[in-house]
Image (cartoon, rainbow, N blue to C red):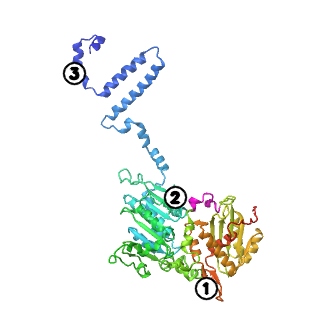
Amino acid sequence: MQQISDELAVKYATIASWKTRDKWDDAPVVVRMEDGLQERYLTLIAKENKSGKDFKEIDLLGRQIERMARVRKFGGDDGRETDLNPNIERRNDEKAKAKRAEKRKNCLTIEQYQSLLDDFHDRNFEYQEAWWDQRHQRTRKIRKSRQVGATWYFAREAFAKIAEMAIEGKQPRNQIFLSASERQALKFRREITNWVRRVTGIELKGKIIMLDFTGLHGDDGPSLDSVGLYPLSTNSATAQGESGDFYFDEFSWVGGFAELNKVASAMATHSIYTKTYFSSASTKTHESYAFWSGEDWNRGRTKGDQRPFDLSLKNLRDGAIMPDGSWQQILTIHDAVKRGLGDLVDIEQLRKEYSEDSFRNLFECEEIDDAQSSFPFALIGPARVDSFYQWRDFKPELIGMPGMRPFGEKRVWLGYDPNKQGRDDAALAVIAPPEKPGGKFRVLEKLRFNGIDFQGQADEIRKVAQRYNVEDIAIDTTGSGEAVLQLVLKWFPTTRRINYSVAVKGALVMKGQNVFRNRRIEFDAGWSDVQAAFMAIRPTLTGSGRQVTYTAKRNGEVGHADIAWAILHALSNEPMDASEPVSRGAKVKFFD
């Protein structure tokens, strides 16, 4: 104060009275800072010969004075956080919100979720609505006919459960899809993305689809954490780690089911999660049958605590709660037709196309008795692999794209089983031969052709051959096979003719058994139809009763298991002694 007195030439007592009256010591910090900034700022402005350092300080002081002004405004009665930081206001204006909404992935509105729920119920068949009614069951086990839309339904059910809970403001749960292979698991993702795109126009992104619920119920509504839709293969390294409701697709065809189920079911350990197992029937020797029949549950219990599981169709047609608390159901093709599938399925036509044994297995949910099979489950099972991970040199996504080579210039062999005696089924297998003698075969592609004549069959073989470096083609000349062969010979002159006889069929089967037994062949784990086709091949006596041949009967006639025979035809290009060199066939180039 003495300095002020001297500067102003005012008595010290006067300065002291000003200090007391105006409460200088009680001045807010911001006022003191403003005074100091102002004094220093005016001093520098008044300086005549300013240095670069002075100009920098003037700029800094100007910014600090501006900040003090914002602090004063914030301290007022109507002060807001944006007074201190203008960027906050810019981040929250309508333009910024719209930009953020555009950038957010997988973000739907309540109206869009409701549209999906409405469409979901509108398109379900009666038996699928019954599945929906049981969605809260802790465990569901469903034995179902082929081609009843189970994968299509459960993919949409999982998303519909999320939509239902999100609309109600409840926290949705992760949905996990477990399949025998990555390729099969991604089918769930395709079903969901196609459905959401059709109904809402939204393109869901990401292999794992993470749904964003930010702002779904506005600023004052419940805040929901994002949830994921996870497609996983049955590789034990990937079938763990996540938690949520899980769906196990075709569990009765998965190798090592018992061990895998221990790992997978742990994902739904918490009681809020549900487990859904659904599959067509396989064999009673498969590990999953003990899980289905209750043998696993009863094992280790005292005799007094054991309970029978009534697996009769009468008990399970509409679903029933079993002693282990699970809800189990059997859905045959007959019940599916009665409950809405009738416009899509002709049961009598299916009976003509399949043997009685195969029809009962595929469509009436009866397990296969593979005790007499030439290729029992135990022999075929190890050949199933997750091709998505293990075959890095094969690009199945290129199949069907004009001019693309899904296997590059690597060699392939084709095996063809034509329709027999006028029946409208034929099969083509694309096999990658071993890169060195004794190595592994790989089934890259399998195709079934229905309702086309010999010219159409030959044309389909040519289309497939155009996308591969084909080294060998083998065609069975039974039925229309001879006509197909003559057409194929015009553009692939070294095509091998296979004339069926007892000796030839015996050699085909023995070669196949040898390849499977030595684990020299692989096919995608999602192809349960390939496994079923091999299991259908059985030894039978010839009409004379003197020789053994191999058949897969269709109404008493040889001709079922077409894809298995097609694979065996291709394998026959390798000598019985796998160490012997394979004769290289011709290479054909196609020109447009």
Residue 47 place in picture, x, y as percent:
43, 15
Is 292 one of the magenta-colored residues?
Answer: no
Q: Position of residue 348 (x, y in %)?
A: 56, 83
Residue placed most toward the observer, 93 or 91: 91
Q: Nearer the viewer, residue 408 or 118?
A: 408
Of 219 and 208, the residue lying toward us: 208
Q: Which residues are magenta?
A: 387-400
Image coordinates for residue 160, horizontal then vertical, percent: 44, 63
Give the residue number, with chain letter if any, for mark 3: 21
Please state, as top left, top right, bottom left or bottom right, where the N terminus lies in the image: top left
Mark 2 highlights which residue? 201
Spatial CA span between label 3 and label 1: 117 Å
Which residue in the structure is indicated by mark 1? 556
Q: Secondary structure at mark 2?
A: loop
Left or right: where does residue 18 sit relative to residue 347? left
Screen quadrant of the C terminus: bottom right
- In the image, residue 105 above or below residue 41: below
Q: Residue at x 62, y 59 (%)?
A: 395
Q: Earlier in the sequence, mark 1 or mark 2?
A: 2
Label 1: state its secondary structure. Answer: loop
Total marks placed = 3
**Outermost residue toward the bottom?**
544
Does the residue at mark 1 contact the one at mark 2 (Cβ under 8 Å)? no
189, above or below 54, in the image: below
